[in-house]
Amino acid sequence: MSLRSSRGIVRTSRNLRCVLQAAMVVERVSEPEFYERVTGTKFEGEYGERASARRRGSKFESNLTTNNAALLRRALAPIFGYDVEAMVVRNFADEIPGPPHELHAMRLTRMRRILQDLARDREVPHLVIQPQLRIQVGPNLTDFEHVSPDFFVLNPAMRMYVPGEMKSFIVRQGVADGADLDLTRRQAAAQIVALRDEAGRLAMHGRVENRALFVFAQPYGLMPARPVIEVLNQEVFEVERAVQFLREVRARLVGLRASTATPLEDLIAELPINYQDRCIGSCVLATVCERRFAGRARVLGDAASDLIGPDTDVGRLVALINGAQPRTPEEAVFATRVRLAAAALGYQPRTLRRATG
Ligand code: SF4
């Protein structure tokens, strides 16, 4: 799996200070292959979505979109006041079948025609399955990433589409399971940014709201739960910053290669990183980056880093835990908190044990 399409933009939006990851996105690397180029060994960890989760997701989507998207229409119609049977559906997966990555251009052309009709106040479909958009991430015509929402539904009040995602996460009492929700929201935010860009070409950008629809699964079977509309102001803001960051990193790479066409793996030392807890399990280079912080507080996690500073020597922390005199205000805060925590756990630092023992 590569860092192409909105996936790369979403990943960048989660770590807006890691130049290396942004460079991987700009170069659209395949992560396991890039890991091998960097380390010389195969990536043995778990990578990408599990096959069982992928199968469940596909089955859920197919349930919702078969029979002219009957289940999806039924779920969405009450939200927008539509008559379920009168809803007009265009399904690009049926119109232009095949793997999406080969069909982006054709689907994008059709989506643009629909948006042109919308701008001219003509009739447009109420529901578009697998529409296509793209985001410009650099100065050249080819510097764009494809963005592929699961569906668009027309909001008649705004005369504009709202992006929607179908996810087989289970909803209980109106709340969806799973840490993947953050990724799903950011995916939808990328769709909003791309839609606003396309709408802007037709002077309709003001009609695009920072809202998206999520259709999750009920706990039993693969029936849709009641759709959820979310306002995604923060996510849209971070995706916009990610797009800008990708442009800057693209220019930086051009500068670094001004004299020689150096492969990305040989530029790593010159590309700042921002190693954090969420790197683990999300970026293939987590173990590689962690090694750069060996012996420093950074490897103890975000909380320790924030408290004492990421570059603090772990040996110094151990000394503070064992009763060494703090030398800085940060060390004093750390020492106090550690002693309070130790007392709560019934642990006596070595110096105290010596004094009282
Ligand atoms: S693991 Fe390394 S390259 Fe990946 S996001 Fe974290 S710091 Fe950046």
Image (spheres, rainbow, N blue to C red):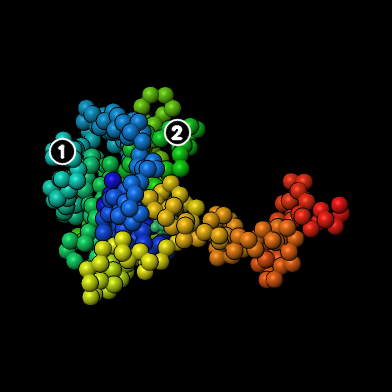
* Image location (x, y in percent) of residue 100: 19, 43
**Is any part of residue 336 visible from this angle?**
no
Which of 167/49 is in front? Answer: 49
Residue 98 higher or lower than 194, as above or below: above
Q: Horizontally, is 273 left or right of 124 in the view?
A: right
The residue wearing badge 2 is: 171
| Foreground: disc 1 or disc 2 | 1
Query: In which image quadrant can residue 53 be found?
Result: top left
Real-space Cα separation, disc 1 to disc 2, in angstroms: 31 Å
Which of 300/207 is in front? Answer: 300
| Residue ID at (35%, 54%) | 39
* Image location (x, y in percent) of residue 7: 31, 50
| Residue sticking out furthest to the top | 221
Say what amino acid the circle numbered 2 marks. Val
* Image location (x, y in percent) of residue 117: 15, 51
Q: Horizontally, is 149 left or right of 320 in the view?
A: left
Q: Horizontally, is 32 left or right of 102 in the view?
A: right
The residue wearing badge 1 is: 98
Say what amino acid the circle numbered 1 marks. Gly
Q: Earlier in the sequence, mark 1 or mark 2?
A: 1
Within 10 Å of the Cα at label 1, are there few (<14), some (14-19), or many (20+) other Cα atoms?
few
* Image location (x, y in percent) of residue 145: 24, 55
Query: In which image quadrant can residue 24 be found?
Result: bottom left
Helix, strand or loop at disc 1? loop
**Which numbered tag is attached to residue 239?**
none
Residue 139 higher or lower than 110, as above or below: below
| Residue ID at (68%, 71%) | 328
| Residue ID at (57%, 54%) | 300
| Residue sticking out furthest to the bottom | 259
Within 10 Å of the Cα at label 2, are there few (<14), some (14-19), or many (20+) other Cα atoms?
some
